[in-house]
Structures are given as structure tokens and as C-alpha cells.
Image (cartoon, rainbow, N blue to C red):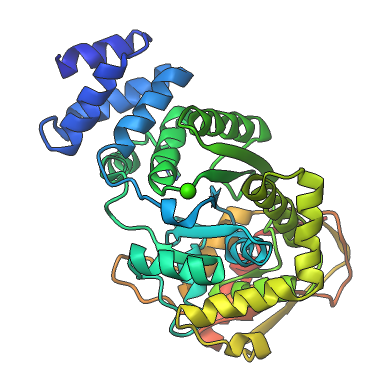
Amino acid sequence: MNIKDIILKKSHGKALSKEEIIFFVNGYTNGEIPDYQISSLLMAIKLKGMNEKETFELTKAMLETGEVLNLSKLGMVVDKHSTGGVSDTTSLVIAPIVASCGVNMLKLSGGGLGHTGGTIDKLGAFDGFNTNISMDEAITLTKKIGCCVLSATANLAPADKKMYALRNATSTVDSIPLIASSVMSKKLAGGADAIVLDVKYGNGAFMKTKKSATELAKLMSDIGRRYGKKIDYVVGDMNEPLGYNIGNTLEAYEAIEILKGKKGKLYDAIIELSGKCIALGLDIEENIATQMAIDAIKTGKALEKFKEMVKAQGGSTKLFNGLKLKPTLIIKATQNGVLKSVNTEELGILVGQMGAAKQTLDDVIDYNVGIKTFHKIGEQIHEGDTLFEVYAKNKGQAKEFAPKLLGCYKIV
Ligand code: URA
Ligand code: CA
């Protein structure tokens, strides 16, 4: 087999065989095929696409370059994956909700990507929370309390790690088969029996339209089922932040508020996703499972489980007693109007730049910076209403960011 022939074949829009896919994935991972040839192939795939079978074979070849976790000691394990958004704390609270309903969830998570905060970063808001635990420890914890969250190790799908970096450098991230195989290679290596996918669309998401997000969700579901997993998915709007808070401590606090019963879009998304996870985990009707999720919040048992998880992983539970942060600056509306649109991606980027996300690899995260918002699209705003509470490093930073934050709101 020859990599030049494979590139040529794909550039003519032909489907690659399983053997050809395994050849280029393994050849690239072990360093036998150079970056420039795989770059060319990735661009051909981006332009000509891949059918479902090719995408499945690509996923399987990538996941087989690394470890596949064995969670058989835990019986049924459910995982949930989000393609990421702004003010999206669903991953923080779904594990305790479903665990409090008798479903095991062992979540492998990552740090933030671009404008979206990562679950691991948000858990860092609970001082001391340790996500760098071994798989054995994670299994023990899950057996004991039903859930745990750990940092994804480098050993899962190393081919994806290398190819994702190359895609970032060659403008080939933006391809549905490449995204689907990238995400699913890591998820399937994670060893869960059932996976619920949360695919976002809009100006704060990877996928810009509902149509493309649905296409991605269906393709990922197809890959998971071919691999023998139980799969379900949700396609959700990210044209505005999902919750009201952005920034690690503020988002972790909002997650606690949700478990104490605060309603809204974030609550709705959490209930829908939890219902799907419980339905797959217990093999019951989704409407019954959804009611179980609602009840877990109502009775306070999901909140107790969250506290138990934070304690079990060494985190401080101080935040459960209330938010001690004070805003550095309050930005008020200077006119009446309706919130027409939000530049969600930019809001996420700005909060990251204030210090909530690493801007370089060796940056240190400031867990306490962030913003609180108060309005959703379509709501009436009155002169003098608070638009943002800014939690900055200092007054100077708050003043520097204020006009940029305001620029993300279109009020007419
Ligand atoms: N996230 C991933 O893990 N891979 C992609 O290709 C895009 C988003
Ligand atoms: Ca299992």
C-alpha cells in the first residue's frame, strides 16, 4: 500500500477501504508517514467527505492506536459527551444526578478549548478537587458513590491527539466526518456501555447550524451503535450562553443553584440529558427516567450526591454554603430595548482572556474571574437594569473589558 495512491483516491472522491484507513492511521501515529502527506489527505477528506462506513473505520483505527478502558467491574456505565459551549455546566451536575438515581457515570473530561470552559477547569473551583486519579481509583470511587470525574489520559486514541493538532494547523478541523471520528475515538476508548451526546449549534458552538449539528449527532450515534454501544443524543441551541454565569467559580456555583432548584434553559438542558442517561442506564422509558431526574433535584438527593462527589475527590465544599465573591464592576443598561442577539463565542473568549482559561500552555487559571449575565434573547431591558456583573482581577481590568462585554450584546 502507498500513501500517495490513498491521497489520490480520496482526492477523486472515492471511498477508502478499511485496510487503507488502518494503513494511514497507523503509519502516521508511529511516525512512518510525514505530516505533509497526512495534511494533504486530511484536506482531501474535508473537501470530498467520507461515507458512514469509512468514518466508522477511521474511528476504530484511531481508537485502536491506544488503550481501550475496561469498566466491566462496574456493570453498566453511562457517559455523556458535550461538544462544548459557553456557560454550560451540564457535565458537572449530570454525573451526580444520574448517580443519585442508581446509574454509574465515570466521566473522562478535558480542559477548555478555545472559547468554551472545560469541566476539569470548572471543578478546579472546588479547592483541592483532584481529577488526576488513576483508573483503579476512579473505578473504586464509582463503585462507592456512583460517579467520578477524571482527566482524560494521553493514552486514549493517541492517533487523534496527533491528527487533531495537525488539523488545527491546516484548517481541517471543520469537517463532519473528521470531527465525528475524533470525538468518538476518544469516547469509545473510554469504555462506557452507553453514551449520550450533547451536540450544540449556534454562534457559541463548533457547528453553526442546527442542520449540521444534527448531521454530526446522527453520524456519531451511527458510529457508536456500530461499535455496539447504546447511544442517544440531544441537539441544543448555543446562540446565547446556556446558563447565566461564565467563569469557573461562578459556573460551579450556578451548577449548585440548579441542584437547589433554580429553573431556566440550563436546568431544562440538564433534565433532558439526565433523563436520556438514566433511560439508557436503567433500560426504562425516557419519560419515567426524566421524572426521576426531576425528583432527584426536588428531593435534594442530587445535591447531596454532588457534595459527596466533591468531598470524595478531595474538593472543598465551601461553595455549597454560598458564593463569597463580590463583583468588581456592575454594568447597567443606558437605554430601553430588547436583547436581540448575543455574540456568544466572543463572550466566552473575553472571560477566558480575563483569566478564566489558559491563554498559553503554562498559564495559571484564575478561578474567580468571570461574569454574571441577567437576560436571555428576546427579553425586555429597561434603562438602569444590570446587564453584567464583572468579577475581574481588579478595577482596571473590569473597566478595560466593560466595553468589549457590552459589544457582545445587541439591544434594539
Ligand atoms: N472536538 C474534538 O475532540 N475533535 C474535533 O475534531 C472537534 C472537536
Ligand atoms: Ca460495562
Residue 96 to residue 395: above or below: above
For the image shown, how many numbered marks are present on the structure?
0
Residue 125 to residue 159: above or below: below
Q: State which quadrant residue 133 falls in.
A: bottom left
Query: What residue appears at the point 53 percent right and 65 percent down from the top-left corner?
Result: 147
Query: What residue appears at the point 69 percent right and 71 percent down from the top-left corner?
Result: 302
Q: Is residue 349 left or right of residue 39?
A: right
Query: What residue appears at the point 26 percent right and 44 percent down from the top-left corner?
Result: 66
Query: What residue appears at the point 14 percent right and 38 percent down from the top-left corner?
Result: 30
Q: Nearer the viewer, residue 182 or 38?
A: 182
Query: For ligand 1, which image quadrant applies?
Result: top left
Residue 128 to residue 138: above or below: below
Quadrant (top left, top right, bottom left, bottom right) of the C terminus? bottom right
Residue 55 coordinates in the image, percent (x, y): 42, 25
Q: Is residue 281 left or right of residue 159?
A: right
Residue 258 to residue 238: above or below: below
Q: Is residue 388 visible?
A: no
Q: Is residue 337 visible?
A: yes
Residue 82 coordinates in the image, percent (x, y): 56, 50
Residue 135 coordinates in the image, percent (x, y): 35, 62
Q: State which quadrant residue 58 falls in.
A: top left
Residue 288 coordinates in the image, percent (x, y): 81, 50
Q: Is residue 398 left or right of residue 21?
A: right
